[in-house]
Image (cartoon, rainbow, N blue to C red):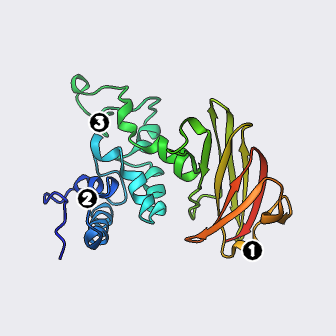
Amino acid sequence: MPRSTSSTNGTQTSAILPLAFDLEPEGTREAVFDHLVSKIHNESQDHVGVGLIGAQWLMRTLSENGRTDLALKIATQTTYPGWGYMIEKGATTIWELWNGDTADPAMNSGNHVMQIGDLGVWFYEYLAGIRADPEHPGFKHAIIRPYPVEGLTFVNASHRSLYGTVRSNWKSENGRFTLDVVVPANTTATVYVPAKNGSGVTESGQPAEKSKGVQAARNENGMAVYNLDSGSYSFASVQ
């Protein structure tokens, strides 16, 4: 049996890091992730249970392993500890400590931006799905792969790249998913549309694969994948 590369101290961070950096052998990944989820449920009651290091990869690791719902629950908690708790207490910046309202001020920065962790990245790259393609840096080619999650009905996001604004706006209601995408001039994109059946995806009211600027690529894990030329697109599908 493959040995786990995780630290044996059992903390949430000791599970997050080997998963995030793909250091965990295939035979043990599921057990390590299950351990992480159990710790979040039972130890931190679905709140943040990590510090600076673990927070840099918490939300992405949960989403990459199929628990975007748990990431959303953590992000929207308004009781201690978490980002929502800071907001509830009137914070307009990120505290150094989760209990910044009660901790010793001498050891407690009121502007500790690294404590935001990967929350901002998660908003843009996972909820909205806007990512740069590492093979084509600077958004010459964009990847738009949203992570719809129950409890969230819409996301509107944009990124101002060197080539222009990349946009991803989606809405999910009554089993219907719509995704409006803008691909700047002189760039291309690959878009992932959540769909039960790729043949049922439309773009501007017609079958997506027949739409100008759209090339059907493949179906992948419940997603219909298309390559796009520059332009504005409006996809719709049944989830």
Residue at disc 1, secondary structure: helix
Q: Of circles 2 and 3, which is in front?
A: 2
Whole-percent x, y for residue 187 in the image: 68, 40
Residue at disc 3, secondary structure: loop
The answer to whether marks 1 and 3 mark residues whose Cβ atoms lie closer than 8 Å is: no
Residue at disc 2, secondary structure: helix
Which mark sits nearer the N-terminus, 2 or 3? Answer: 2
Q: In the figure, residue 198 lies in which quadrant?
A: bottom right
Whole-percent x, y for residue 211 in the image: 83, 59
Q: CA distance from mark 2 to mark 3?
A: 22 Å
Q: Amino acid at mark 1?
A: Ser
Task: Name which residue lies at 48% across and 62% down.
Answer: 69
For this orientation, the residue located farthest to the left is 8
The answer to whether marks 2 and 3 mark residues whose Cβ atoms lie closer than 8 Å is: no
The answer to whether marks 2 and 1 mark residues whose Cβ atoms lie closer than 8 Å is: no
- Using the image, tell me which numbered label, if any, was put on residue 60: none
Q: Amino acid at mark 3?
A: Leu
Can residue 223 be seen in this snapshot?
no
Q: Of circles 2 and 1, which is in front?
A: 1
* Residue behind mark 3: 97
Which mark sits nearer the N-terminus, 2 or 1? Answer: 2
Q: Amino acid at mark 2?
A: Ala
Whole-percent x, y for residue 95 in the image: 35, 32
Image: 151 above or below 139 = below
For this orientation, the residue located farthest to the front is 135
Which mark sits nearer the N-terminus, 1 or 3? Answer: 3
Q: CA distance from mark 1 to mark 3?
A: 50 Å
- Using the image, tell me which numbered label, if any, was put on residue 199: 1
Q: In the figure, residue 14 lies in which quadrant?
A: bottom left
